[in-house]
Amino acid sequence: MTARTGETFNERSKGKDIRMSNIVAAKAVATAIRTSLGPRGMDKMIQKGDGEVLISNDGATILSQMQVMHPTAKMLVELSKSQDIEAGDGTTSVCVIAGALLDACGQLLSKGIHPTQIASSFMKACNAAETILEGISRPVDLTKREDLISAVNTCLSSKVVSQNSDVLAPIAVDSVLGVIDSAAAKNVDLRDIRMVQQVGGTIDDTELVNGIVFDKGAKKSAGGPTKFENAKIALIQFCLSAPKSDMEN
């Protein structure tokens, strides 16, 4: 009998390499947005595929524009999106924390600790952290408008528009309070609030409209009116044009 030649495939070595590859990919994503964290964080300039340049320091915005291919890195992108949908803030923090935890996992794995034991310990630490946070937290009273504005100012402190927070924070609070029941609401559907962008003007020209805004300009060339007060609006669900002839018959 002749001995087998060639490289010997080691299943345990393969599993170790995959785990380290996942950790490295997640750390790369966390490192990319780490410098944009906090009020002193730097803005990122991103060039899209169509040539448009985007400047932002919001974690969800940056990660959504990145072309990430690794499955674990994609999980961090989805994590940031989930945080944005659920809380509306902390999109960069969750990715940085996840990257730091995975870095700690790499050090524990290098010491020979089994991955199952590490995962079990992380679950215990998560439960302990939730207990501590619930103990030091306080409920949000939606009837106290000034407290809500202060919370929004904190969220905007790390954004590009932080200098205009005195204008945007009250608008954000009033828009949310206008679509929910302050006494019983637990969450808000942001699809009930629409942002209409217009060319020209500054951020200080932003205003809250309690109603419907149509993104249509007035026809001034024919000398028609540009403003109506207490107008009556008809919502018509059928075509106003004359019926066309049936050419097939």
Image (tube, rainbow, N blue to C red):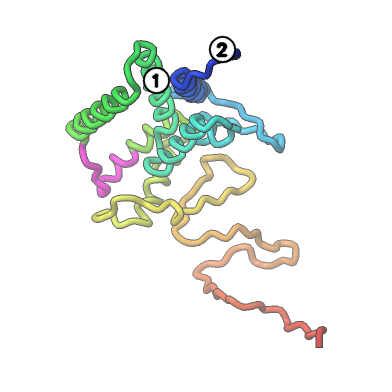
> Are the residues flagged by discs 2 and 1 in contact, CB closer than 8 Å?
no
What percent of the width, then of the height, locates residue 229? Answer: 52, 67
At 42% from the left edge and 41% from the top edge, which residue is drawn?
82
Say whether residue 73 is left or right of residue 134.
right
At 72% from the left edge and 66% from the top edge, which residue is drawn?
223
Q: Amino acid at mark 1?
A: Ala
At 37% from the left edge and 32% from the top edge, which residue is drawn?
154
Q: Residue 203 or 75: which is nearer the viewer?
A: 75
> Judging from the image, what secondary structure is the residue with disc 1 in?
helix
Location of residue 64 with respect to 245 vertically, above or below? above
Location of residue 213 with respect to 231 vertically, above or below? above
Q: Is residue 96 visible?
A: yes
Question: Residue 3: which numbered mark, if any?
Answer: 2
Query: What is the CA distance from the residue labelled 2 to the residue labelled 1?
Result: 46 Å
What percent of the width, then of the height, locates residue 34? Answer: 47, 21
Location of residue 139 with respect to 72 vertically, above or below? below
Q: Residues within 10 Å of mark 1 (few under 14, many from 20)?
A: some
* Residue situated furthest bottom in the rendering: 249
What percent of the width, then of the height, locates residue 213? Answer: 53, 59
Verify whether residue 142 appears in magenta: yes
Q: Is residue 34 visible?
A: no
Please identify the quadrant where the C terminus is shown. Answer: bottom right
Q: Amino acid at mark 2?
A: Ala
> Judging from the image, what secondary structure is the residue with disc 2 in?
loop
Q: Residue 163 or 66: which is nearer the viewer?
A: 66
Write down the region rendered in magenta: 138-149
Can you tell which quarter of the image residue 129 is in?
top left
Say whether residue 58 is left or right of residue 108.
right
Verify whether residue 193 appears in magenta: no
